[in-house]
Amino acid sequence: MLLNIEHVKKSFAETEVLRDISLHVEEGEFVALLGPSGSGKSTIFNLIGGIMEPDDGAITLNHKVIHGKRGLIGYMPQQPSLFPWRTVLENIVLVQELTGKPNRQEAKEWLEKVGLQEFENAYPIELSGGMKQRVAFIRAMLSKQNLLCLDEPFSALDEFTRISMQKWLLSVWETNRKSILFVTHSIEEALFLADRIYILTKRPTMVKEEVIVPFARPRDESLLNTEPFFHLKQKIFKQLKDELDEGL
């Protein structure tokens, strides 16, 4: 087991955010976190990344407790967070610069893999939204960590670009098989990408259900129009709706 979170609790002053969170990610697995807005998904990432420490419970990576320890995961935020004064290539090797000697040749090889080799000397303002997300993903990949935490990386993209990026992410993941923990508000996105989905309750957050996604890999967008996909999507939608309705 690569990542294991056991009975983690977290509060901010009088606000209880995480009541009792337990989940895990295996080597080479793609896991999605799906829940209402404000359910603490980003807080979970902050705990894994060492930005915060849990009030109770344990977080282990490769069987070692990682509370408050940074630099152990690759991270891709909702926004690409590219420095406008650095070129594409310079943005990609930024994390490597902070941790050691940057490998510019490897970065260039990745740019070629994702079709951006012509933009290595371009600046972020010259890129489309999807291109910026690819650059941010390469930067996370080159961190060399076994676990990538992706926090709604496609939420700001239009529908066609988002589908294209989802397919691209799956193609890259199928080749490299790094473990991914993926936060999303989209049921469809979670089902299309993940091996397993943790459905979270509203705050204070607990795991409502673990869903094992039954669809074979590799996947393409034709899956979105199948009856089994639609039925599972509706089932999860009802679970999330029931969760929200309980708070009304």
Image: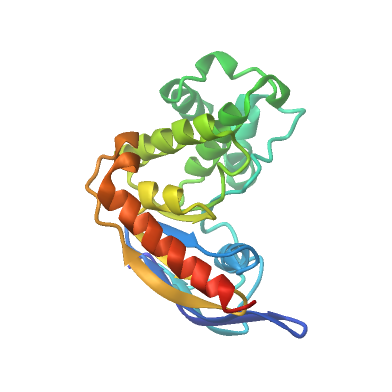
Q: Pick whichever, 115 or 95, lies toward us.
A: 115
Q: Pick whichever, 8 or 120, lies toward us.
A: 8
Where residue 10 appears, as percent x and y from the top left, is: 63, 80
Q: How is the image coloured?
A: rainbow
Residue at position x 58%, y 82% in the image: 9
Quarter of the image where one finds residue 69: bottom right
The answer to whether residue 196 is above or below residue 193 is: below
How many circles with numbers are drawn on the protein? 0
Where residue 89 appears, as percent x and y from the top left, is: 60, 26
The answer to whether residue 227 is above or below residue 107 is: below
Where residue 145 appears, as percent x and y from the top left, is: 46, 51
Residue at position x 56%, y 32% in the image: 135
Left-right relation of 229 to 184: left
Image quadrant where one finds the N terminus? bottom left
Instruction: Kindly give the residue lying farthest to the left in the view shown.
Output: 216
Residue at position x 41%, y 24% in the image: 113
